[in-house]
Image (cartoon, rainbow, N blue to C red):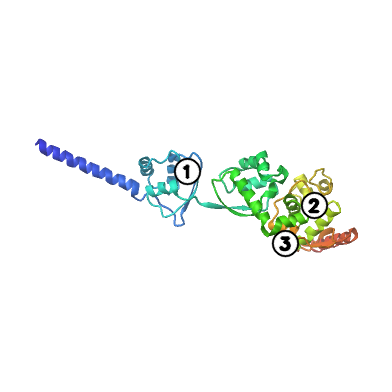
Amino acid sequence: MLKKSIIYLSLGLLIIGGVFAFLTYQAIFGKNIELPDNGYTLELAPNTTLEELSNRLHEEGILLNTKKLELTAKLMKYGSNIRTGRFQLSDINSNVELIRFLRTGSQATTQLVLNNVRTLEDLSGKIASFILADSLEVLEVLTAPETSETFGTNLENVMSYFIPNTYEIYWSETPQDIVFRMKKEHQKFWRTNNRLEAAKTLGLSPEEAYTLASIVEKETNQDQEKSKMAGALLNRLKINMALQADPTAIFATRDFSAKRVLNKHTQFDSPYNTYMYPGLPPGPIAMASISSIDAVLNPDEHQYLYYCAKGDGSGLHNFATNLRGHNRNSKIYVQNLKKRGKR
C-alpha cells in the first residue's frame, strides 16, 4: 500500500512538474507578442522599469500577458538595466525573442531634418522633436560656453555650424552628441567643392560667409537670383557701404510677424541692424540653405549695389547700380503692387 502511495505521489509530482515545465516553456517561447503588420516602434527612456515596459506594451495591445513577460524576464535576469533607445519591433512573437532583441538588437535610426529656423530657440525645438531631450535641454547645450569652444567660435555664430540637411541619428543621442556630429558635418561641408578656398578668396571666414548667406536666404527664395544678390551685397561690403538689408532689422527687433519693414525696425539700435551699422552683423540671422551659401561663395560679378522686389508675384528683384535706378525700381514695385490689388 505504501509502495503504491509513493508511486502515485511520484506520478503526481511528475505530472505537476510537467505541467509547470510546459507552462514555463509556453511563457518563455509561446506567442505573447501581437505586432501590427507594419511593425511597432518602441521608445525606451532612461531608467525605464520592467513594470513600465510591460504595462505600456499591454495597454497598447502589443503584449498579451504581462505576467508571462515578467516571469521570462526574471528567468533571463532582464529588467535592472533596460537599454535606452528607439527600437523597431517586427517578426517577434515570444517573450524571449522580445527580451533578446531589446538586449542586443540594433536601435532604429531617425531622420534629423534641419532647415528653415531663425534663432537658437527655434533650432533647439527642431532638434528636440527628433531626440529624447526636450528643447530647454538642447538650448542649454547650444548656448553653453563649452559648445562655443567645441565649435571654435562664439555664441553669435553657433548657428553657422548647423548645415541644413537630413542626418541619420539615434533618438537616444544627447544634445552634446548632436553638437559633435554637427562639428564633423561642418568640417566635411567646407572641405567639399573647394568652399573653404572660395571663402578665403572673398576675404571671408566660413562664419562670415554663412552670415552673409543667411541674409541672402531671407532676402529671396528664388535660387536663380541668389548669386546676383550675393554679388550686390559683396559690392556693398567692399566699399564699406551699409548693407541695409530688411531681414537684419527684423531679426534685430525679433518682430518676425512683420509683413513690412517700418522705421521702428530700421531705427532699432542693434549690431544686427545693417541699416545702422555697416558690415556684417555679429552672426547669422537664420539658418542658411546650401544654395544660399554656395551663392555667396560663387557670386555674380557685376556693379549692382541695390535691389528691390519687383512686386509682380514672381519673388524676383530688380537690380540697380545707383540710387536713381533704385528709386525707379521702387516705383515699379509700388505700381506692380497696385496692379495686383496689394496696395
The quadrant of the picture occupied by the N terminus is top left
| Mark 2 vs 3: CB contact within 8 A | no
Q: Which residue is mark 1?
A: 83
Q: Secondary structure at mark 1?
A: loop
The quadrant of the picture occupied by the C terminus is bottom right
Q: Is residue 155 above or below residue 40?
A: above
Residue 6 in sight in this render: yes
User: Tag 1 or tag 3, which sits nearer the N-term?
Assistant: 1
Residue at the spot 31% in from the left edge and 47% down from the top edge: 25
Q: CA distance from mark 2 to mark 3?
A: 19 Å
Q: Nearer the viewer, residue 97 or 199?
A: 199
Q: Nearer the viewer, mark 2 or mark 3?
A: 3
Q: Which residue is mark 2?
A: 246
Q: Residues within 10 Å of mark 1 (few under 14, many from 20)?
A: some
Q: Residues within 10 Å of mark 3 (few under 14, many from 20)?
A: some
User: Tag 3 or tag 2, which sits nearer the N-term?
Assistant: 3
Residue 13 disc label = none
Q: Which residue is mark 3?
A: 223
Q: Secondary structure at mark 3?
A: helix
Residue at the spot 69% in from the left edge and 56% down from the top edge: 289
Q: Amino acid at mark 2?
A: Asp
Q: Amino acid at mark 1?
A: Arg
Residue extending farthest to the top is 2
Residue 23 found in image quarter: top left
Q: Is residue 192 left or right of residue 341?
A: left
Q: Residues within 10 Å of mark 2 (few under 14, many from 20)?
A: some
